[in-house]
Image: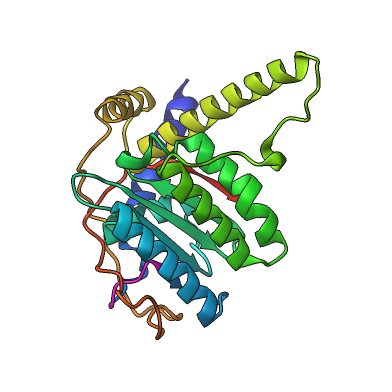
């Protein structure tokens, strides 16, 4: 029993230390001039960056929803989702009060990626959908080093889902078997996936805020019911980051900047 208590205390201490270290971690600075596509890893061509930027700026202008892409080399010792949440809050993706932002972050050397959503997008982009986009849309392209194609397809689906226009194509459809067993298994698998993602999100939120599991569960349930939140963040950072986030070109109108949105840690992560 004593050994178990000591293990819990050590785990709690490491969690608090981890949170402090990430908050001091040198995050990429908020882009100036503002950009929605920030390739600090240098894996996209100028034409590809501009194409994605124009696409996302147009979507922001028409819907006020901000989808940001950040590509870095590594998150160091930190889990990609915790790192992305820190960056999301530091940049203030989405609009304050609406929290209608989303972040696709990929650590190229780590081969890890995550999608983080604000409270306002959790209805149209729930955790299970974010996981499916990672596994079925981004991952296959990234494995073939088709980074632009994966990001382009992922943002297209995210935009369609936000606008309620997404229709699954044949690759997502069932094979038409008459047996009901595959359908039952699929429903069970989806339920298990949703439940697993939910549990992972609660654990991540608890770890991030140094609170108990059930406290985190209660707080997230309350936040989901309200479908909004305005959490501040002390996740600082900013330093001399390399990369190519201030290239020329881009959309004629340009991106006006992030609006101070926040997130409760919704989304999903994966690798390739």
* 28 sits left or right of 235 in the view: right
In this view, the residue in front, 208 or 60, is 60
- In the rendered image, residue 187, in percent from the top left (x then y), is placed at 63, 20
> Is 115 placed above or below 258 here?
above
**Image position of 152 (left or right of 50):** right
Q: Residue at x 37, y 82 (%)?
A: 246
Q: Nearer the viewer, residue 222 or 247?
A: 247
Q: Which is the main secondary structure of the residues drawn in magenta?
A: loop
Residue 7 drawn at (x, y percent): 47, 33
57 or 37, which is in the foreground?
57
Q: Residue furthest top?
A: 180
Q: Is residue 134 visible?
A: yes
Question: Is residue 23 visible in the rendered structure shown here?
Answer: no
Q: Residue at horizontal 48%, vertical 26%? A: 4
Q: Residue furthest bottom?
A: 248
Quarter occupied by the C terminus: bottom right
- Residue 140: percent from left, percent from top: 69, 54
Residue at x 33%, y 78% (from the top left corner)? 252
Q: Residue shown at 70%/60% (left/top)?
A: 143
Q: Is residue 38 magenta?
A: no
Q: Quadrant of residue 54?
A: bottom left
Q: Position of residue 147 (x, y in %)?
A: 61, 66
Residues rendered magenta in the picture:
33-37
* Residue 270 versus residue 240 in the image, above or below: above
């Amino acid at each position: 029993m004593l050994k178990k208590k000591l293990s819990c205390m050590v785990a709690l201490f490491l969690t608090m230390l981890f949170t402090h270290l990430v908050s001091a971690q040198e995050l990429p600075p908020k882009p100036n001039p503002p950009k929605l596509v920030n390739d600090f890893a240098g894996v996209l061509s100028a034409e590809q960056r501009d194409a994605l930027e124009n696409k996302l700026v147009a979507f922001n202008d028409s819907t006020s929803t901000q989808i940001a892409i950040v590509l870095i080399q590594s998150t160091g010792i930190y889990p990609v989702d915790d790192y992305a949440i820190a960056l999301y809050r530091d940049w203030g993706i989405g609009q304050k009060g609406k929290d209608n932002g989303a972040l696709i972050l990929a650590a190229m050397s780590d081969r890890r990626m995550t999608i983080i959503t604000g409270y306002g997008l959790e209805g149209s982009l729930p955790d299970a959908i974010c996981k499916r986009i990672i596994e079925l849309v981004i991952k296959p392209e990234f494995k073939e080093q088709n980074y632009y194609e994966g990001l382009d397809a992922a943002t297209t689906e995210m935009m369609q889902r936000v606008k309620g226009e997404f229709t699954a194509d044949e690759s997502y459809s069932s094979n038409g078997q008459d047996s009901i067993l595959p359908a039952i298994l699929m429903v069970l698998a989806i339920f298990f996936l949703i439940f697993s993602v939910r549990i992972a999100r609660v654990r991540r939120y608890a770890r991030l805020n140094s609170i108990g599991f059930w406290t985190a569960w209660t707080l997230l349930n309350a936040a989901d019911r309200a479908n909004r939140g305005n959490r501040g963040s002390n996740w600082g950072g900013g330093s001399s980051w390399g990369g190519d986030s201030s290239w020329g070109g881009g959309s004629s109108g340009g991106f006006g900047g992030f609006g101070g949105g926040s997130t409760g840690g919704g989304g999903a992560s994966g690798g390739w």
